[in-house]
Every structure is written in C-alpha cells, then in structure tokens.
Amino acid sequence: MKLIYTREGRYYRRWVNLVLSLLLPGAAQFLSGRRAVGLSLFALYFALAAGVIAFLVHPATAYSFVNMGPFDWFLFPFRLLIAGDGLRRPIPRMRLRSWGILVAVYISIPIILVLGARTFLVPFKVPTGTMQPTIMGNRTAPDGSPILGDHIFVNKLAYRSSEPQRGDVIAFRSKGLPMIEQDTYYIKRLAGLPGETLGIDPPYLLVNEEKVTQPEIFNRIAKKEDGFSGFYPAKVPPSYPAPLASPSARITLGPDEYLVLGDNTLNSLDGRYFGPIKRRAIIGKAFYIYAPADRKRRLD
C-alpha cells in the first residue's frame, strides 16, 4: 500500500481508512489513535444490528427475515457515517503482525456470533405440511403464488435440566430411522414417553389404553378443531411392518424411547411408520415461529 510521509511518520492513504471502516465499523478510528471512539462505534453498530434482529423477530412487527423490505439497508447508512468519520485522521503504518490481528478479529467476530448462537438456538425451515396447521409448510396461495413455509427457532438447551414432555414440538435427528431421509432433521410433536404403550383409536391417541386429552393440543387435534384432522393409523399395506398401522396395533416404548407424531396425521411420515426415537436423537424444543411475518408466534 502506498504511504504518505510526514514529519510525524508514515501513514496510509485515506482510502485504507474507508475500506477498514466498511469491513469493521470503528476500525479506522481505533487504528488512527481514537481508540475509545472506535470501540464505542463498534459497540453501537452491533447494538443496532441486534435491535434490528429483535425488531424483525418480534411478533408485533409486520416484517421478518424473509421479507425484510427497507431493513435490508437500515444499517448501511450508519456504516457510511462511521466510515466518513474514520477519514478524519490517517492510520499510521502497521507491522504485518498488526494486520494479522486485524484480519483475525474481522474473521472471528461472525464466527463467534454464529457459534455462540448455535450453542442454544437453531433456526429451522419447515418445507412440508406434516405439522399443519400448527406449523405451515410451503404452499400455494389462491392466486397461484408460492408461500414459504414457517421458519422456527429450536432451543437446544431446553432439555439440559429437564426431560421432554408430552405435547412438546421437538427437533430430532433421523439417523437410523427407517423410511425417512437419513442424516437430516425433522420437526414433530412428542406423543409418547418412555415406558408407555401407545395406540390410535381414531380420532384419539391412546396412552396405556386411555384417550389423551392433555395437554390441550391433543384434545383439539382429536376434536378436529382449528383445522386439525384427528389421529389416524399409518396408511400402509397389511404386510408392511409399520408399528401403528391399525386401530388394534400397540407399541410399547423402552426406557430411553419416545414416540413422535405430526399434527397432520393424514399426511405425516412419523412414528406410526418409523417407530420410536432415542433420547440422544432429540436436538431441542421448537418454541417460536419467526417468519413469515404474518405467522410469527410462540408454538403451543
């Protein structure tokens, strides 16, 4: 890079300030000697970014991550203001080690943010309608335009201090389960707990030969309220070894096994077909729909 030589020393040309400010807000101020200003602008920028994210996730707002509208550019003018302020003083020539530290900081910030978020929160996109109407999949509007499926957050820490409960909407790994795609993730409702015997007496789910009406969501599904269709056995030929393929079929869960069902049992490839899942397969609890905008809400 070309340098400017003065009595005070050697400095980079001002375009270096601009590039650094656009890449890492506050970097030009910090490197030019205005360290408190640089750190303050850096913190303010990321605080505003967090505010935008919170605004888009909040259920009362008419925007979301999949239709951000003007919020795509909300932070860019502020970034330009920071960059403009960064031009006030030149940056002294730095050694290669200093440049290495700067690049490391630039690369590590998004990695740390992503990894930090993924330790307790995982975003999922649901393309199918197996959990409708609780979670909507990709579908077509009356005018023929496509509608994206729901995007949900899964809390990975939900079961660190407690066990999964009946009625929870959970994410789980499919590895080792028959009939479904391997090495991927599915979203279903937890219906059966370890040691229980389950069956289906349409439109009710049975646990230990008792009709399940609690939590309330099971009562709503069985009564076909709010767009639900009830519980029904798997639709397979009589010779197919599906665990719950008839009203007389029963499945008893082991001490480390759970049974999951889709809310839309008329169109759901779930535990009726592939059987129980292990505790270690459960990733976490799905708790919030964050997109599209008109679907944002907490999950029952």
Image (cartoon, grey):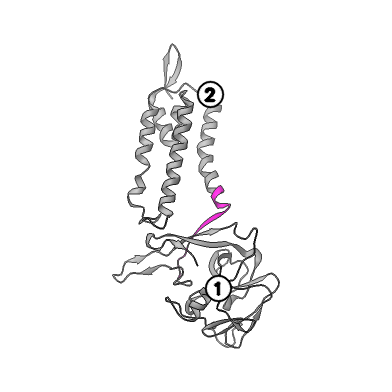
Q: Is residue 119 magenta?
A: yes
- Nearer the camera: disc 2 or disc 1: 1
Instruction: Look at the picture and state if 131 lies above or below 54.
Output: below
- The kind of residue tagged 2 is Arg
Question: What separation in Å lies between label 2 and label 1 (alpha carbons)?
Answer: 64 Å
Residue 27 lies, in percent from the top left, at 46, 31
The quarter of the picture where residue 240 lies is bottom right
Judged left or right of residue 164, residue 291 is left
Q: Toward the viewer: 243 or 227?
A: 227
Up-down: is 99 above or below 71?
above
Q: Disc number at residue 215?
A: 1
Neighbourhood count class around disc 1 (C-alpha, 10 Å): few under 14, some 14–19, many 20 upward: few
Q: Find out whether residue 104 is within the magenta segment.
A: no
Question: From which residue to which does the magenta span run?
Answer: 115-128
Q: Are there few (<14), some (14-19), or many (20+) residues within 10 Å of tag 2?
A: few
- Residue 206 in the figure: left or right of residue 221: right
Q: Quadrant of residue 6?
A: top left
In the displayed structure image, the side of residue 149 where residue 121 appears, left or right = right
Query: Residue at label 2?
Result: 95
Q: Earlier in the sequence, mark 2 or mark 1?
A: 2
